[in-house]
Image (spheres, rainbow, N blue to C red):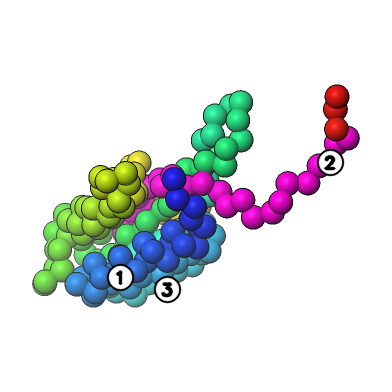
């Protein structure tokens, strides 16, 4: 199992998604917290936008052992803000000009992320495990022209500090 910091995971994913984004004339951003996702979406360029966010991790070592194995939770938000429309939500299923519909872009981006592999014991394994998708809704309940995909990636925590005895030795 590899040791990766959240920053390393996001930067690696950003590098790969940037290649996909350039073919879609999309912007790629990294959000530092859940509220920055909404701030970036509020900037509202009339183009496709991909936002990456590390949503924390979950210890998966088991109940009896602290092995430092975690599942990192990564969120990938895809937005296609086209501004005010006569038929709101029309871009969900219908493209415009040369731009595909939002659900087609979503499927393409999900496929791109799921295609990333890493060599492991002589075989290739998927890096990012897909865990679902939902519409992005603001805290006030307003639905946006955006979807949030959830991915998980396993890693081990770095053993950064030497162990320090805080209890007297028990005999």
Q: Is residue 30 left or right of residue 59?
A: left
Q: Residue at the spot x=24%, y=74% of the render?
A: 22
Q: Is residue 61 above or below residue 57?
A: above
The residue located at (57%, 37%) in the rendering is 67
The label nearer to you, 2 versus 3, is 2
Task: Give the mark, 2 or 3, whose residue is nearer the N terminus.
Answer: 3
Which residue is at 30% across, 65% downward?
17
Pointer 2 or 1: first along the chain: 1
The alpha-carbon separation of the residues under discs 2 and 3 comes to 50 Å
Q: Which mark is residue 18?
A: 1
Crowding at mark 1 (Cα within 10 Å: few <14, some 14-19, many 20+): some
- Whether residue 13 appears in magenta in the rendering, the answer is no
Residue at 84% over, 41% down: 166
**Span colored in magenta:** 143-168
Tag 2 residue: 166
Q: Quadrant of the C terminus?
A: top right
**Residue most extreme to the right:** 168
| Upstream in sequence: badge 1 or badge 3 | 1
């Amino acid at each position: 199992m590899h040791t990766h910091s959240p920053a390393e995971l996001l930067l690696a994913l950003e590098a790969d998604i940037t290649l996909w984004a350039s073919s879609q004339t999309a912007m790629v951003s990294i959000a530092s917290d859940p509220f920055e996702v909404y701030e970036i979406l509020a900037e509202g360029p009339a183009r496709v936008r991909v936002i990456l966010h590390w949503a924390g991790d979950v210890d998966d070592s088991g109940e009896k052992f602290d092995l430092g194995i975690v599942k990192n939770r990564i969120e990938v938000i895809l937005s296609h803000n086209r501004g005010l429309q006569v038929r709101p939500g029309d871009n969900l299923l219908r493209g415009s000009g040369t731009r595909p519909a939002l659900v087609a872009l979503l499927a393409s981006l999900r496929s791109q992320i799921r295609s990333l592999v890493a060599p492991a014991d002589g075989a290739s394994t998927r890096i990012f495990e897909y865990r679902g998708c939902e519409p992005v809704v603001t805290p006030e309940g307003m639905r946006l022209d955006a979807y949030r995909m959830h991915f998980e990636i396993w890693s081990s925590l770095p053993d950064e500090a030497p162990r320090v005895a805080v209890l007297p030795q028990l005999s």
